[in-house]
Image (cartoon, rainbow, N blue to C red):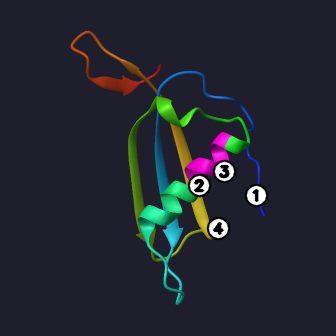
Amino acid sequence: MVRQQTRETIDGEYAIHIKAQKSNKRRDLDNILKATSDLLVNLNIVDDSQCVALAAEWAKKTTAPMIVTLIPMEPNDDGQHQILQ
């Protein structure tokens, strides 16, 4: 089940951070990251070719089985990416 907090589209570059609960099932973070990214593309929330940074981690306790944070980014003057203000 997908819970929607916001359903805004991110136009442009973004970073994604995933915090997932570790379970007894055999699964790995890179597969979770790929499946989540594909779902966000299918829901027309992001264009995965615009992803400039990604991170995933196991969380001992979270309020949900998985927390996904999308952060709009923009390049600064020296070409590095920064959070879009």
Residue type (three-letter) at the residue carrying disc 1:
Val
* Residue labelled with disc 3: 39
Name the side, left or right, on which 17 lies relative to 36: left
- Percent x, y of residue 67: 58, 58
The segment highlighted magenta reads 36-41
Q: Residues within 10 Å of mark 2 (few under 14, many from 20)?
A: some
User: Mark 3 or mark 1, which is nearer the start of the sequence?
Assistant: 1
Q: Residues within 10 Å of mark 4 (few under 14, many from 20)?
A: few
Distance from the alpha carbon under mark 2 to that under mark 4? 15 Å
Name the secondary structure under disc 2.
Answer: helix
Q: Are marks 1 and 3 in contact (CB under 8 Å)?
A: yes
Distance from the alpha carbon under mark 1 to that under mark 3? 10 Å
* Residue labelled with disc 4: 64
**Label of residue 36 in the image:** 2
Distance from the alpha carbon under mark 4 to that under mark 3? 17 Å
User: Mark 4 or mark 2, which is nearer the start of the sequence?
Assistant: 2
Q: Is residue 29 magenta?
A: no
Distance from the alpha carbon under mark 1 to that under mark 2? 11 Å
- Compared to residue 74, the image places residue 56 above or below, namely below
Name the side, left or right, on which 85 lies relative to 52: right
Residue 73: name its quadrant. top left
- Residue pictured at 40% horizontal, 46% vertical: 54
- Compared to residue 81, the image places residue 44 above or below, namely below
Q: Are marks 3 and 2 in contact (CB under 8 Å)?
A: yes
Q: Residue furthest left?
A: 78
Residue type (three-letter) at the residue carrying disc 4:
Ala
> What predominant SS class does the magenta segment belong to?
helix
**Label of residue 2 in the image:** 1
Q: Are marks 4 and 3 in contact (CB under 8 Å)?
A: no
Mark 4 or 3, closer to the camera: 3
- Residue pictured at 60% horizontal, 22% vertical: 11
Mark 2 or 4, closer to the camera: 2
